[in-house]
Amino acid sequence: MGHIVVMDDSEAQFALTRYSRRLWHELRPDLPASAEYDQCGTLWVAADEQEMAEVRRKEKYYNQRGVRAEVLDARAVAAAEPYLRRNLAGGLRVVDDGVIYPPCAARYLIESAIAWKAQLRTGADVRALLREGGVVMADGSRFSAGIVVNAAGPWSPALIPGLPVRKRKGHLVITDRYPGQIHHQIIELGYLKSAHSVGTDSVAFNVQCRKTGQILIGSSRQYNEEGTEINHEILERMLQRAFEYMPGLAKLTVTRCWTGHRAATPDKLPLIGPVPDNEKIWLATGHEGLGITTSLATGKLLTDLLLERPTEISAEPYAPARLLQTNESAPEPCLTA
Amino acid sequence: MVGAGPAGIAAACVAAENRRTVAVVDNSPWLGGQIWRGIQTKTRGGTARHWLDRLQNSDVQIFSSATIFASPSANQLLAETPDGVLEFNWKKLVLATGARELFLPFPGWTLPGVMGPGGLHAMAKSGWPVAEKKVVIAGSGPLLLAVADGLKKEGARVSLVAEQANWSEVMRFGLSLLRHPRKLIQGVGIKSRIIGVPYHFGCWPVRANGSSQVESVTLTDGSRSWTVDCDYLACGFHLVPNLELPRLLGCAVSNGYVSVNEFQLTSVPDVFCAGEPTGIGGVDCALIEGQVAGWVAVEAPDYARKLFGLRADWHRFRASLHQAFALRPELRRLATPNTYVCRCEDVRLEDLSNCKSWRDTKLNTRCGMGSCQGRICGAAAEFLFGWKNDSVRPPLFPVRASSLAGKTDALPEITAEPNISSPT
């Protein structure tokens, strides 16, 4: 499930996630039931007083900026989520966050685009971008276009070598159905350390519940793991971390494990806009773990920038130019052969 | 040896009798696999008794109720048992994972009382009362006759066996039985006991009828349809191999079966495969393949070679079995738009209308994402749409989260923790 969440690692991250969450709220009445949008809220749990201080800081920061958040003490956390371990310090509830099932939401969005005369080609493998605008397909055929947007996520560097986007692997463990047991997306506050560390492998307690009652247990972050196979070592660490926060999870039946790659940038912000020196090639990539949340805002920003309209929030912090040099050593779009 | 059916037992006996340290691991609580289930206590003499005795007189270590669910590193397997997780470190591995029944969706197939022939037979053998119950057996394959025989012995009133294959095809198969004397005797032995049970060829179920329980089944021969009352409809369309573990270990699969060489070796070094995963050939074929794997595993390939001739006979038998019971294309059109395809996730045929692949289907409809892990609907979708499901990840079977978490000594002791209740 995708987590629709407002996060505050930086002002720019906060602005983009808040904007995008509002867009999800606006879209919600039109989404099909299969998108399973559930405004369950995020519960950030604090293990100790140090983390509680961070909870209070976040509460203030969010509320000052119009994002509803409330501090929960240990008793209130236990009441909100009875399966959490008892000796937690407290938590922060971000009321208007939610979860969504991305494949069906994406399907709705693409069908909306098609209704506006967009053409969809599936099974069409793009091998290269053309400097003069357009793409080369795997079968050698070309498709010309005034502007191409590279939104290939963790695979985006394959089309623009040198693009500073790295694959960051994650694991998820998915249980059988246990409806009514977990009410929020629950995340340890230490998740922020894990998500925002740039270096080593990390795990953090992060669970969410689908409407079906299946519980999704995460999370892990690893660089230099290109394959999609399960890495048992990090899977074990991830589960043990989850059991520390919610011991009852250990007894649940697991039906599946999943892996995927996030598209990570060095400064933890996405790349949205044209590449330097070539206004025909645009980027919408590098969203790391916030791709579902920020997808709608990314689309709006791209549209406004393309149409040279004012953007609702400043697009400057996400401009690719900040990470891509504009000199001779700029990443070259691929072949023009 | 993974699997305590005929192939696994044969391989285990050969290896243990040659003084190797042998473990047999099986997820069921009994020995003998699906085919010899329940035979241990009841039967005297015969092939099954011979092999089960031979196994029990050997030094093979038997791990029943042990479900292999992961292979965290090369030459290592993890099994969940009621008492915790077992770790197996192997030098030679024989995969004898058997087969399961193929279920195809048709209106009413999810009604209570509709089940697999093998499943109903197993339940009857474990004491589920079938005496005086009206049973219709439908689908395909020699298993239907064996189940008719077994259910009659348990007192069921088997009113009909409906085989989808045509008489002419099965006759060709029947004629090829003549070249396999033991199969012929077995076949006649069954037939003599089920005299009085009509065995219809070229007919198949189109609908199971009933409100809360199956009450009748409508059958067709392609030109006319008729309805037969029943308390149980035992319906299965022959067998599909269990390929999850071979695939997890990276064994090459071609045309739906594990590829093996003449020594039963797969594409992965030191990993053998024997029995149904290499081709649906029945007990005798599995026993010979298991012995070949056993002899090669103990580095006595000359003994394996002595079995090649016999195995070739059974492979011819297997090929004719395959031909005779090939599924007719009409079976692809039994389901109506509102027929469930995936019963774990309540996905109907109409929900699949825009899907182009198995992955697409899983993402968009959740078909195959439930607790059977796609074992039932995945096999059906492969037959219906030609979608391949070749991505396999641990856990191979549903297991407790703690089994996937490795050592959990570091967990804090927490008392009076509310229990998360059982799945509903």
Image: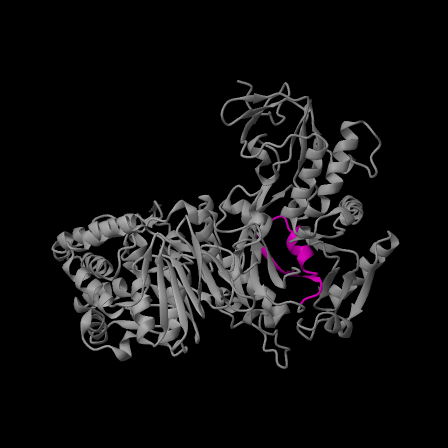
Q: Judge by depth and name the residue closer to the eye, A224 or B3.
A: B3
In the image, B249 versus B151, the foreground residue is B151
Comparing B291 with A127, the one in front is: B291
Q: Is residue A13 visible?
A: yes
Range shown magenta: A182-209
Q: Position of residue A35 (x, y in %)?
A: 68, 51
- Above or below: residue A63 compared with residue B126: above
Residue A80, magenta (yes or no): no
Q: Residue at x 51, y 43 (%)?
A: B357
Left or right, B416 with respect to B207, comes to right
Q: Residue at position x 47%, y 68% from top?
A: B113
Horizontal arrangement in the rendering, residue B45 relative to residue B154 (left or right): left
Which quadrant would residue B419 be assigned to in this image?
Answer: bottom right
Nearer to me, A144 or B225: B225
Q: Quadrant of the N terminus of chain B?
A: bottom left
Up-down: is B65 above or below A157? below
**As displayed, is residue A91 above or below residue A276?**
below
Say above or below: B133 vs A289.
Answer: below
Q: Residue furthest bottom?
A: B416
Q: Find residue A19 and report its horizontal and vertical position in percent.
A: 80, 45
